[in-house]
Image (tube, rainbow, N blue to C red):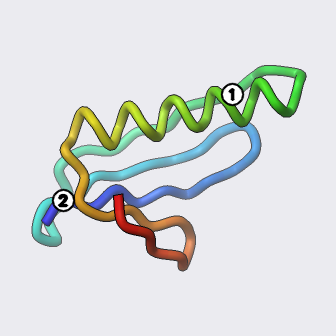
């Protein structure tokens, strides 16, 4: 099972991908947009790209779990 773990923040967010509990890769992205709506759109786009790129089955955000 491929899992995307997110340490979500309003500007810089960390992420990691695990496959069957083993770390595959990790990184971060920064949303420098001054408009909150633009920032949220950017974050959503990045998360969706990670889900597609790594064929994610489930994702977790700081203690929350959601199916992909």
Q: Which residue: 77% across, 24% down?
A: 38
Q: Secondary structure at mark 1?
A: loop
Nearer-the-camera pick, 42 or 13: 42
Nearer-the-camera pick, 21 or 51: 51
Q: Which residue: 57% across, 37% down?
A: 44
Residue 48 in picture, x, y percent from top left? 43, 37
Disc on the earlier residue, 1 or 2: 2
Could you say which quadrant of the image residue 20 lies in? bottom left
Question: Tags 1 and 2 in contact by the CB under 8 Å rule?
Answer: no
Q: Which residue is mark 2?
A: 2
Residue 41 in picture, x, y percent from top left? 67, 30
What is the count of numbered marks?
Answer: 2
Nearer-the-camera pick, 61 or 57: 57
Residues packed near mark 2 inside 10 Å, few (<14), some (14 to 19) or many (20 plus): some
Residue 45 in picture, x, y percent from top left? 52, 29
Quadrant of the frame with the C terminus? bottom left
Q: Which residue is mark 1?
A: 31
* Residue 7 vertical position relative to residue 28 in the rendered view, above or below: below
**How far, Cα to Cα, is label 1 from label 2?**
25 Å
Could you say which quadrant of the image residue 13 lies in? top right
Q: Which residue: 32% across, 43% down?
A: 51
Q: Secondary structure at mark 2?
A: strand
Quadrant of the frame with the N terminus? bottom left
Please tell me whether mark 1 or mark 2 is closer to you in this view.
2
In-image side of 40 versus 49 (left or right): right
In-image side of 46 versus 41 (left or right): left
In-image side of 8 versus 36 (left or right): left
Residues packed near mark 1 inside 10 Å, few (<14), some (14 to 19) or many (20 plus): some
């Amino acid at each position: 099972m491929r899992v995307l773990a997110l340490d979500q923040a309003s500007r810089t967010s960390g992420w990691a991908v695990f496959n069957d509990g083993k770390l595959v890769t990790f990184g971060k992205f920064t949303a420098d947009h001054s408009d909150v709506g633009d920032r949220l759109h950017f974050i959503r786009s990045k998360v969706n790209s990670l889900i597609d790129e790594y064929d994610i089955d489930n994702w977790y955000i700081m203690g929350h779990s959601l199916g992909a």
